[in-house]
Amino acid sequence: MLTFYSADSRLRQARTELHDGTLVAPFECPERVDLVLKQLRLSGLGEIRAPSAYGLAPVLAVHDKDYVTFLANCWEAWLAAGHEGEAIPNIWPARRMRGDHIPHAISGQLGYYALAAETSISAGTFEAAMASKDVALGAVEYTLQTGEPSFGLCRPPGHHAAYDQFGGYCFFNNAAIAAQRALESGKRRVAILDVDFHHGNGTQQIFYRRDDVLFISLHGDPEVTFPYYLGYADEGGEGKGEGFNINYPLPHGTSVATWMATLEQALAKIQAAGCELLIVSLGVDIFENDPISAFTFTSEDFTNLGQRLAQAGLPSVFLMEGGYAVDEIGVNVSNVLHGFEQGV
Ligand SMILES: NCCCNCCCCCS
Ligand SMILES: [Zn+2]
């Protein structure tokens, strides 16, 4: 299987994440991609290719222009305002305040565009996010042209990024950008299957009123899991999108057997909807030892997951999302992709 990767993924070198009331080293660290690359090479998955630069147009096809401009300028504006640390919001347009006005001060803009406080912006964040969406575009273009599966080793991840919002370590929604590209190249309907432990709130929000993308997510119950305020089972899409958004919230500690049985339901929906391409938002934070998650996959279970996805029989693009058990991330990602190749 061909892998797309950009060394510019390492341009995001954030030093702080707000976690449990203190500033810690970010869980979404550059070493994640180093260890995935190492295991892919060790296991002989296939060629690793750098993508072309696709520019801003594919980003603007799914994200708000002012939001993209904000991301491009945020770090410089933060420094110019004399702030010492990394750019982290500390106020939001809370209920019964004016949520439709974008303040002039960068501190106000941060709260307007941020969905959460754990994701700092710093030097290189925008450039890394641009490289990450190029990785996703390289992967989807390859699969569209050849029908062969591909893996986009995206960093930073994307599934929490909404039309005009960043957070959950995400800035551009790589899977949404890839799906939009596939539709523009002629696919009539694309499935995005989000297997990350956390609900892909951004992907849901981008396609919620559309029927050309079927978004399906299996994830930790938002009653007790980030992002808390989206990802419930009653969110079925709106307008034309009714029936094309399916959430499977699952309790902490869900067994792999139950998770895989839920996957069967998801794959049946994908088949019934006549999807012509499968994009997998591949978060391996469903691993039993993930530090910020609560599902129970072993490394071997990831191989079974890959094998099962191959049986869906669709041209498939895997895009890296979460996974924070850094020591095992390489094996877990590699197992999904090799499992897929075994299952074809
Ligand atoms: N600081 C740990 C709390 C988790 N908050 C963000 C989770 C983002 C997952 C991305 S897949
Ligand atoms: Zn996650």
Image (cartoon, rainbow, N blue to C red):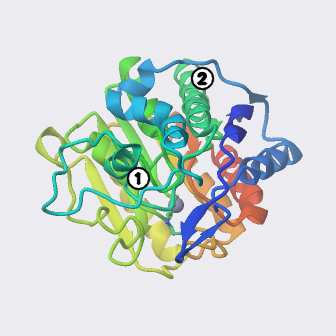
**Residue 137 versus residue 229: which sits nearer the camera?**
229
Query: Which label sits on residue 125?
Result: none
**Residue 228 versus residue 312: which sits nearer the camera?**
228
Question: Please, is residue 291 above or below residue 184 in the view?
Answer: below
Which of the 4 quarters of the picture holds residue 222?
bottom left
10 Å neighbourhood of mark 1: few (<14), some, or many (≥20)?
some
Task: Give residue 89's position: percent from left, percent from top.
Answer: 42, 56
Task: Give residue 294's position: percent from left, percent from top.
Answer: 53, 77
The residues bearing labels 1 and 2 have C-alpha atoms spaced at a distance of 23 Å
Question: On the rendered structure, is 6 left or right of 239?
Answer: right
Q: Amino acid at mark 1?
A: Leu
User: Which residue is rendered at x = 35% and y = 65% of the image?
Assistant: 248
Query: Which label sits on residue 267?
Result: 1
**Residue 282 versus residue 32: which sits nearer the camera?**
32
Task: Give residue 316's position: percent from left, percent from top.
Answer: 53, 37
Task: Name the quarter where the N terminus is drawn.
Answer: top right
10 Å neighbourhood of mark 2: few (<14), some, or many (≥20)?
some
Query: Which label sits on residue 142?
Result: 2
Q: Amino acid at mark 2?
A: Tyr
Q: Is residue 21 visible?
A: yes
Question: Please, is residue 235 above or below residue 141 in the view?
Answer: below
User: Which residue is rendered at x = 72% and y = 25% of the image?
Assistant: 50
Which of the 4 quarters of the picture holds residue 67?
top left
| Between discs 1 and 2, the one toward the N terminus | 2
Question: Please, is residue 59 above or below residue 114 in the view?
Answer: above
